[in-house]
Image (cartoon, rainbow, N blue to C red):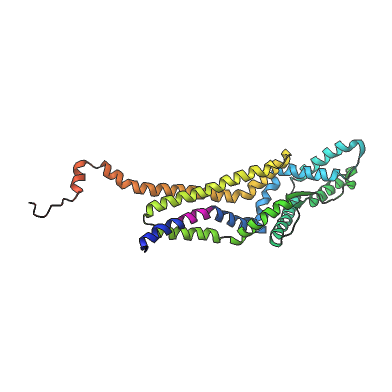
Amino acid sequence: MIHTPRAVRSVLAPVLLVLACLLVPLGTLSTWAKYEIGDSDRYVSTMTPLATDPAVQNAVAEAVTTGVMKDIDVGPLQSTVEQYLNQAVVSFTDTPAFQKAWNTANRAAHDAVQQALDDGTTGPVTLDLAPVTEQVKQQLEDSGVPFAAQIPVTHTEITILSGGDLEKLRKGFHMLQLAGLWLPVAALVFAVAGLLLALRRRRALTATALGMALGAGALLVALTIARSLTLGDLDNDTDKAAAGAVYDALTSSMRTASWVIVAVGVVVALGSWLSGRLPRSAARDMPPDRIRATIPVTHKEGAP
């Protein structure tokens, strides 16, 4: 059977438009992975505001306090010293020095994650809080606190990615970073080509806009589920609150882009659908005598 150009268009156009819709969430992910997570400066910029987040400050204070108290023995004053130290760390988290230490630690953690993704390094990736401990120790010594000199500046760490999680992410995340902007560009090319080939372009535009909105919506649902699963593995309420704040910060740009795509898709689909309905509505509201006047009258051959 020989396919005519019209038959080819009727098959090729839907295929291209479906591919375009499927690439929308993948393109959003690849752009985020390449330019939000893959770029060290943007990553640190994203994490910087979290230094003032109470949940993050409490998690850092708890981690530093726990790490320090493991190596300090002050007898019956243990609980009192622990409480005092925790308050001192919380107080320190409101200072510019903590902001600087936080950014330094996050840049080092980002570089470690990226290196692990690139070269296959195994083992967990951690956020080293030693600079925070050192600053707190110095402040307590300057204030004349007796036990301050005993505080060890150990490498108190918060695990960002376990070795198992890193192994799961490596292949997929690395591929997304390599794809970068190519996936959203491919989605745009497929959409334009599919619409140009479509036999009924208005209907194709409506379906494509809705499909892209659904694709972006599916990504939003996936991000919500992933957040729930991530926090579900944590037992400590402080850790959950801090992890939630970090997750929301890291995925903020992706969620914003997805909502924009959903909104634009719905508006374009609605506008396209209404533009196809308006002429019919106008004809339906036209008086019967005017409708009859617009219908051409044909006479049979030989009729008067």
Q: Return the x and y of residue 103 as percentages of the image width and height.
A: 72, 53
Left or right? Give the position of 100 relative to 46: right
State yes or no: residue 22 in magenta. Answer: yes
Image quadrant occupied by the N terminus: bottom left
- Magenta stretch: includes residue 239: no
- Residue at 28% over, 44% down: 282
Tell me the residue at 77%/42% (across/down): 90
In the depicted structure, whether residue 10 falls above or below residue 149:
below
The front one of 60 and 196 is 196
Kindly report the secondary structure that dominates the magenta region of the rendered protein.
helix
The residue range painted magenta reads: 16-24
- For this orientation, the residue located farthest to the left is 304
115 and 60: which one is in front? Answer: 115
| Horizontal and vertical percent position of residue 4 | 35, 63
Q: Nearer the viewer, residue 261 or 298?
A: 298
The residue positioned farthest toward the front in the image shown = 1
Quadrant in the rendering for residue 8: bottom left
Q: Position of residue 239 (x, y in %)?
A: 72, 42
138 or 78: which is nearer to us?
78
Instruction: Describe residue 79's horizontal placement relative to residue 23 as left or right.
Output: right
Whether residue 54 is visible: no
The residue depicted at 91 percent of the width and 40 percent of the height is 74
